Image: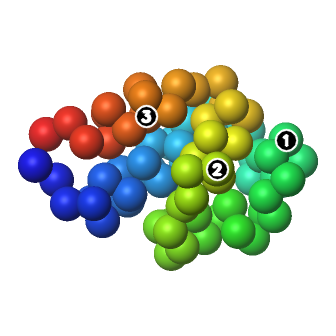
Amino acid sequence: MKSAAAISRAVAEILRDHAEQTFVTQTELARRTGISQSQISKLFRAERPMTIGQLAELCDALHLSIAAVVGEASAD
């Protein structure tokens, strides 16, 4: 089983990679979510803990399921 910190890093990586693959910039994500671009940058680098609310906003903006993201992040 992965540690909580490892899952958090994996969630950030999944969101960042999906944004890049779908050509959604951090600036666009900031516009869609109301989370500042600088905060999104820190969240994507796992420099700040991500709240459930932020996860929900980012998943919604990227058209992802929270369950799918967390499931993928926690898979061994």
Label 2 secondary element? helix
Q: Counting other residues with Cα less than 10 Å from the Cα at mark 1, is it few (<14), some (14-19), or many (20 or more)?
A: some
List the residue tagged with mark 3: 69
* Outermost residue toward the bottom in this view: 47
Quarter of image, res 9: bottom left
In-image side of 68 versus 56 (left or right): left
Residue type at tag 2: Gly
In this view, 58 is above or below 40: above
Q: Earlier in the sequence, mark 2 or mark 1?
A: 1
Mark number displayed over residue 32:
1
In-image side of 61 versus 54 (left or right): right
* Residue drawn at x 32%, y 33% as measured from the top left: 72
* Residue drawn at x 64%, y 52% as measured from the top left: 54
In this view, 61 is above or below 43: above
Residue nearest the observer in this picture, 16 or 67: 67
Q: Give x and y (percent) for residue 27.
A: 83, 53
Quarter of image, res 57: top right
